[in-house]
Image: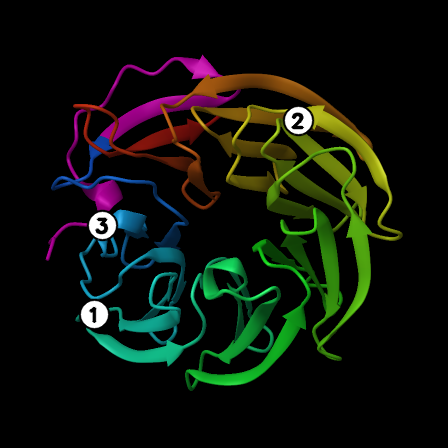
Amino acid sequence: MKSLPLFLLCAALMPGVAHAQLKLLQRIQVPGDVSGHFDHFAVDLTHGRLFATPEAGKCLEVFTVYGIDEPHAVFYREDLDRIYVTDGEDGSLRIVDGGTYKILKTVKLRPDADSAAYDPGTRYFYIDNGGKDAKQSYSMISVIATDTGEIVTEIRIESNSLEAIALESGTSRMYVNSRGTNAIEVIDRKQRRIVATWPITLGNVNVPMALDERNHHLFVGCRDGKMVVLDTVNGRELQALPITKGTDDMVFDTVKKRIHVASDGAVDVYEQTDADHYKLLGTVPTGPAAKTARLVPELNRYFVAAPKHGEKKAEILVFEVE
């Protein structure tokens, strides 16, 4: 078990070159021979910890927690000092003690338990699971009460593959990327049912998403190299902007009004010039399959996980957001 938080490790600072307002500060090598892709990040600001999920590593980095076969989404609840990690291979949610890193509880779901989103109002955790990896033509959104670790309810979606989930804070709406049908499913969290389906026609293989609640825009990253902008009032596709192919992560910075899209080998940064117009600030190279990222506005940092490639070991790239 490692003893130091990842972004407090004394790695040598790299001379940074500003690209698209992202300045590379640091490369932190992931200990051990970790191979395969990473999935999502989580942050514990109080204790200075960054949690990463190497899918093939069967552990949770930075502090190694063994017993997680294929980690995907990770969320840290500070008030309980609990870490919640979805396990795609086992089809479960692992609830981990944030102090001892002991797995306290396993909530059984379905294979391919993957993306998740947390509602701070209800303290519910929404997890997509099932689908083709479970040999099912449909998938489920499982709703977990993080206070107790119990399943509250499940919502069925007629798609064999789901991806990112985004929650509106001002309404009870939840957006789910249905990769299996190339559409967005809109779910009412109070009614716990699908209220609309919005087809994606301007891009293919929709995976990550980000939400601009103020301007009623939903950004959908498609792996064919398009970022589709939708109007959340009516579901209409407004435009499609070019991005690097193979995207897996994206975030909208509500303060700086920028969209960071992490794809296979690069991060594209768009600036929102007004509610309906976007300008590409630049594309920052990261490395093969380095498509998992996390923006931490409180630290003014953007973290990118770069998997092992050839003889080069896996590492975390630390960027300053300028």
Taking the view exactly as shown, the residue that stands out farthest to the front is: 135
Q: Is residue 44 left or right of residue 10?
A: right
The CA span between labels 3 and 2 is 35 Å
Q: Nearer the viewer, mark 3 or mark 1?
A: 3
The location of residue 298, given as percent across then percent down, is: 45, 46
> Would you call the spot at circle 1 few (<14 residues within 10 Å), some (14-19), or many (20 or more)?
few
* Marks 3 and 2 close (CB-CB < 8 Å): no
Taking the magenta stretch, the answer to whether it contains residue 178 is: no
Amino acid at circle 3:
Gly
Residue in the foreground of this view, choosing between 161 and 276: 161
Q: Is residue 149 left or right of residue 273?
A: left
Looking at the picture, does residue 149 appear above or below residue 237?
below
Query: Residue at 11% of width from left, 53% of height from top?
Result: 2
Please give the name of the residue rendered at 41% of the width and 21% of the height, measured from the top-left corner.
Answer: 23
Kind of residue at disc 1 = Gly
Magenta segment, which residues?
Answer: 1-27
- Of badges 3 and 2, nearer the viewer stands 3
x%, y% of residue 188?
Answer: 75, 71
Residue assigned mark 1: 99
Q: CA distance from mark 1 to mark 2?
A: 39 Å
> Residue 100, image x and y in percent?
17, 71
Q: Is residue 2 magenta?
A: yes
Q: Kindly identify the amino acid type of the residue bearing the numbered disc 2.
A: Glu
Element marked by disc 2: strand
Which structural element holds mark 1? Answer: loop
Q: Nearer the viewer, residue 225 or 51?
A: 225
Q: Which residue is mark 2?
A: 271
Rendered image: mark on residue 57: 3
